[in-house]
Amino acid sequence: MNEPFSGERDSFTSKFGVIAAAAGSAIGLGNIWRFPYVTGENGGGAFLLIYLLFVMAIGLPVMISEFVIGRSAQKNPYGAFRMLAPGRPWFLIGLMGVAAAFMILAFYTTVAGWTLEYFYQALTGNLSGKTDSELTQMFNDFQQGSFRPLLWFLIFMGFTAMIILSGVRKGIEKYTKILMPLLLILLITLCVRSVTLEGSGAGLRFLFNPDFSKITPKVILEALGQAFFSLSIGMGTLITYGSYIRKKENLASSAFYVVTADTLIAIIAGIAIFPALFALGGSPASGSGLVFIVIPAIFQKMPLGDVFALIFFILLAVAALTSTISVLEVIVAYLVEELKMTRRNATVAATLAVSVLGLLTVLSLGSLGNIKILGRNIFGLLEYLTSNIMLPLGGFFIVLFIGWFYSRKKTRDELTNDGELRAGYMPVYMFLVKFAAPIAIAIVFLYSLGILKF
Ligand code: PHE
């Protein structure tokens, strides 16, 4: 078999291959870094509840729809819409996806770089014996320093590009089947330590006891954005991956497994973080550094903590890597198939362009921190625009496309593999993509813009 993703259409070799690659994309910093910090900033339990609702009612149908579009068109998102809806403006969704991919890579790889820094710090014994406030100080100094975050960013971007180019990607995906369960075991170990710390109960209550007075338009929009971001949906990542799925795989059940795994990991990360955070007397609303301060702090309170920290951060880096390659793949597939670039040139061009934006993004947390657009620094702006606006907007049009434009027969054929599988969920799925999901997204947008009031 050819190397996958080489420009020639190729496919994942097994059901597990599909799920592993899509889960590799979905599971990453979104679950372990972003979920806890966004949940912390948005009031805890009530946010979690809304998030779960969005994952099931909107996220799952969007993911299935992306798989349907990708596998039936066998193309990158832009090309897929051009082919399935010739002469119509649906291809704009594909272009927005490529733009979102650039923006996500810039801030995501920044955070991925932090995992390398912490791996390095653990390796050189620098986390050892540090108090909680020293760990906070260490994180802040690191960010302000600019040079190191920049270096790690570039190294991580380089790794991502190398994997896209070298064809070792399949190998990486093979290893994720071993490495991700290991990460899960470490996370569960962290949970055990976290909930057995004195005063941890408040953290569990924060996460699981919804306080509905905390719900605001902002909280709802953030929950929607986090659902999209964490599931890798709304920008065509899974259209691209869908195009590599073999004809005999069951798209809906694959999507269901990916959504379940992704959601479980996020919740487990929450159980690892919040009890410890409350036990240590920290504030849940301390922003994007939360996990990088709390997790080393928990490890400090465990036997062999330094070794665990070392393993944890390298596994987290791998989890991030299987996500960054899925984002870069969107840009590269577009450049190769639509602009007829070679895979090599496409990868180099995309990597250079992302690196320029990434440079500004990294510096926006340090020396360029005073540049504010819409009240946010560049990092915050990219994160906000992509997860809260572009991905949900992309998802909105993707479900509308399947619900109202694309032939229902073709959708059914794709979901049943031309009649081989049963798809008893079809009516529910069609209801979700036609009505529930697009209406819910529209309401969240209008509500958070203040146009709609309850
Ligand atoms: N879902 C990934 C994560 O949670 C991030 C991602 C977003 C990947 C969008 C692809 C597309 O880490």
Image (spheres, grey):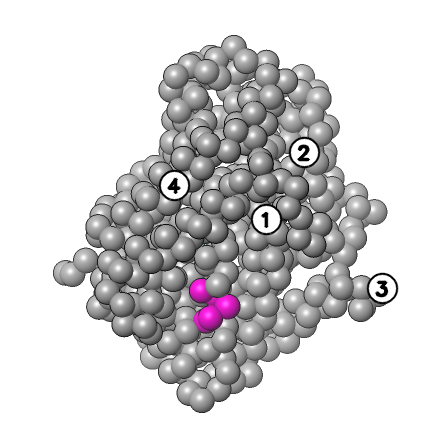
Amino acid at the residue labelled 4:
Leu
Crowdedness of circle 3 by 10 Å Cα count: few (<14), some, many (20+)?
few
Q: Residue at x 58, y 36 (%)?
A: 367
Q: Secondary structure at mark 1?
A: helix
The one of 376 and 30 positioned closer to us in this rendering: 376
Q: Secondary structure at mark 3?
A: loop
Q: Are marks 4 and 3 in contact (CB under 8 Å)?
A: no
Crowdedness of circle 1 by 10 Å Cα count: few (<14), some, many (20+)?
many
Quarter of the picture containing the C terminus is bottom right
The one of 46 and 109 positioned closer to us in this rendering: 109
Q: Residue at x 57, y 46 (%)?
A: 379
Rendering coords of residue 434 (x, y %): 59, 77
Residue 378 is tagged as 1
Q: CA distance from mark 2 to mark 4?
A: 26 Å
2 or 4: tag closer to the N-terminus: 4
Amino acid at the residue labelled 1:
Ile
Residue 37 is tagged as none
1 or 2: tag closer to the N-terminus: 2
Residue beneath label 2, please? 286
Q: Is residue 183 left or right of residue 141?
A: left
Is 95 within the magenta? yes
Look at discs 2 and 4 and give the one toward the viewer.
Answer: 4
Crowdedness of circle 2 by 10 Å Cα count: few (<14), some, many (20+)?
few
The one of 17 and 338 positioned closer to us in this rendering: 338
